[in-house]
Amino acid sequence: QVQLVESGGGLVQAGDSLRLSCVASGRTITNLPMGWFRQAPGKEREFVAADSRSGGSTVYTNPVKGRFTISRDNNINTVYLQMNSLKPEDTAVYYCAARNSEYGYKSTRSDEYEYWGQGTQVTVSS
């Protein structure tokens, strides 16, 4: 089992930056694929970013390419989402997720992630 707790969300202005954190417990996530998803009001949950493992390859949804970066700190079993040049359309609840698959592939599909955090709200004002 993996427990995930996100933090770092908040209310910011367009153009600002935020760094979301996702602390994992119960299992080392070094070799687990990790992902970030988001859900805006009235919309379905959508993929944002993922990596295959610590230091592995990454993938991003087109709207965030060049602005968001997924990274990890193995020492504290944490994955981050650095968000720069935020836009009002980035407003959503952001979720961290983990796949139960050591050395597995990174996925953009939410149904391939077994573990989820509770989410953290990001609101970007114009």
Image (cartoon, rainbow, N blue to C red):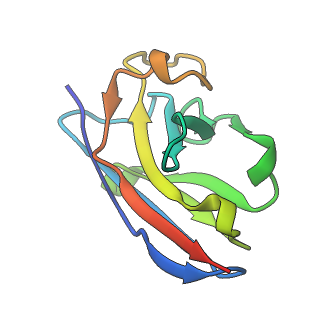
Residue 109 percent coordinates (x, y)? 57, 21
- Label count reads 0
Which residue is located at x 65 percent, y 82 percent?
16
Residue 86 percent coordinates (x, y)? 68, 71
Q: Is residue 102 above or below residue 122?
A: above
**For residue 110, side relative to residue 86 (left or right):** left
Which residue is located at x 63 percent, y 65 percent?
83
**For residue 23, side relative to residue 13 (left or right):** left
Camera-side residue of 123 and 61: 123
> Quarter holding the C terminus?
bottom right
Q: Is residue 58 above or below residue 72?
A: above
Camera-side residue of 46 and 41: 41
Residue 81 percent coordinates (x, y)? 55, 57
Residue 40 percent coordinates (x, y)? 52, 49
Q: Which image quarter: residue 91?
A: bottom right
Q: Which image quarter: residue 61?
A: top right
Which residue is located at x 35 percent, y 21 percent?
114
Q: Is residue 5 above or below residue 2?
A: below
Which residue is located at x 48 percent, y 65 percent?
122
Residue that sits furthest to the front in the current view: 42
> Quarter holding the N terminus?
top left
**For residue 67, side relative to residue 93 (left or right):** right
Q: Is residue 55 above or below residue 75?
A: above
